[in-house]
Image (cartoon, grey):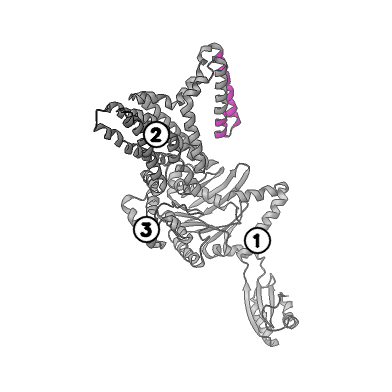
Amino acid sequence: MSAIIKKDYRAYFGSLMGYVLLAGFAFFTALLFTVICLRGLNADYSQVLDATSVIFLIYIPLLTMRVFAEEAAQKTDQLLFTAPLRIWRVVLGKFLAAFLFFATCMGVTLVFPLALSFFGKIPVPAITGAFLGYTLLGAAFVAVGVFMSSLSGSQIIAAFTTFGALFVLYLLGAIKAIVPSDTMSSVIFVCVLLAFLSYLLFDATRSLAAGAGLCLAGLIAVVATALKNRNMYEGLIVKFLDFFAVTARFENFAGGILSVSDIVYYLSFTAAFLFFTVNAAEKRRWR
Amino acid sequence: MISVKELTKRYGAITAVNGVSFEVSAGEILGFLGPNGAGKTTTMNILAGYIAPTSGSCAIDGLDIVERAEEARERVGYLPENPPLYNDMTVWEYLNFAAEIKKVDKKSRKRAVEDIMEKVEIADMRGRLNRNLSKGYRQRVGLAQALIADPAVIILDEPTVGLDPQQVSNMRGVIRELRERHTVILSSHILSEISAMCDRVLIINRGRVAANDAAERLSGSLSGGGRRYAARIRAGRAEALAALSPLEGAGLKFEYDGEREGGASDVTIIAGEGLQTDPREAVFGRLAEAGLPLLMLKPLDVSLEDIFIQVTARDILEGEAEEPGEAGENTREGEEAD
């Protein structure tokens, strides 16, 4: 696995892309730093970090688009997937390499709060908390990007779908406010979700009985629980979306609060997308 | 060493490999022969563990390729049709990476990389970026990657495609040397290559095994027992055939084959199935008596080319008789499978 981490991390510096990404990230952070801290006479660097999270939207897709898509396009995945290596090791290695590059970029921007500290008192704990928080957020976004890259053999498509996914995650806070919260729409929502899961099961097992069985059993359970306890379904869609609302936790970071639940949340979000990636890579072999 | 049973791979509605079974014993060189899109690459990809079969099984050294994938893959080196080279790496970096993911231990890795570079003659290219290598060198680096962990089984997909004649000859030399310590499967649609290098030939057509035998035996079984010879005689058509006609009673047939050299007739001599003796002496004697100079006399082997055409043609005829409606679909399947 360390071989893959080394190879992928070096690959960023083997082409212009890595330098452009690093320079771009540093430049835009510097811009925000100048506007918010220097011109605004503000020592709270975490506000800059809060603003940089917008850069992630463009930066992460460009960072992760090549991870699997390039291997597929160049057919170098034939070397990786015929080597005596478990697929999860390949996926984890590739993720860690992309994440390390991201962490390198974040590390470079540490020079800004450091510079600030020479000229006055800065809120160290708040900045450290925020810094770690945004690094975790970046890890979650990188995992989404790695997953998207594993779905397509085209880097362009991988970049666009990653951007799309991150954008939706970004807007989830706003979307949440307009979704209906009554019981009826919640039940319909659960049914749609159920249909989707049943299809996934059918797709994985190629057994119509399994898919239909899950769908039917689920439907009975939903109808039964809905009739018994109507309140259970109230606001369910919002709760569901809350899980994906990665950006909802921004405010905590910006305030310098890094809670255990936030850390666990981001780590499990990252792990979930890496798990999807392993599945996607495994599924490609069986197609 | 390799055992493949009823291997089938479907891509949606398309069947690329259809119930292929064969065995390869240790130290053997097996050639996959078939037209483009016959299912050679798909079969090799399955053996190397790159894709999984829809049904059927294959085992490398008794290890199932799906159930015990990691161990099975440790025993296989694979050179796909396009060598899987990372363009941004140098040859040396690339081989080190390949050695590391193929679990060559750290202590012997340096040695292994040096040795393999010597063996395939790329040592002077070590610092070159893969992207700047010519096709011949790319192929060699790809071969080095397949050999680096010294696997028992080596699978080479069209190893000589795109090489110049000198490189083809070198590549064949390297492959022949592999026979001493490895079991090799190689594919090609070039017949002379297969007959030059392989102990056994597996003809694959439209996803099925059309023939599986030693190259010599394949030619024996298909020539129908009747041996053929080509003769060139300095004489006109009528004169030559007249001189040979007394031999027709002894189970020989003569066919005039045109004039390829000025003033000489080419005649094909067909020995009847019952004839045990070599008819060449009789022919020579007869022509000497008639005073006609014999310019050339040689046996005509049934080449793999003929076998290939016969086998695949037979297959197509049988296929059409069995499933008249699917002919169109099957052509398409071939194209997409490769």
Mark linked to residue A210: none
Of the numbered discs 3 and 1, the one sitting upstream in the chain is 3
Along the viewing direction, whichever of B255 and A24 lies nearer the viewer: A24
Q: Secondary structure at mark 1?
A: helix
What are the residue bounds of the magenta stretch? A198-226
Assign the N terminus of chain A to one quadrant of the image.
Answer: top left
Can you give x and y, in whole percent of width and height, for residue B137 in the image?
Answer: 45, 60
Residue beneath disc 3: B127
Can you give x and y, in whole percent of width and height, for residue A72 in the image?
Answer: 49, 46
- Which amino acid type corresponds to the residue marked 1 in the rendered image? Ile
Q: Is residue A108 a member of the stretch shown in magenta? A: no
Distance of mark 2 from mark 1, alpha carbons? 58 Å
Badge 2: residue crowd in 10 Å (few <14, some 14–19, many ≥20):
many
Distance of mark 3 from mark 1, alpha carbons? 46 Å
Same chain? Circles 3 and 1: yes
- Which amino acid type corresponds to the residue marked 2 in the rendered image? Ala
Residue beneath disc 2: A139
Along the horizontal axis of the image, is A149 left or right of A185?
A: left
Q: Chain of mark 2?
A: A
- Dominant SS of magenta comes to helix
Identify the residue shown where x is 58% and y is 63%: B191
Residue beneath disc 1: B309
Same chain? Circles 3 and 2: no
Distance of mark 3 from mark 2, alpha carbons? 35 Å
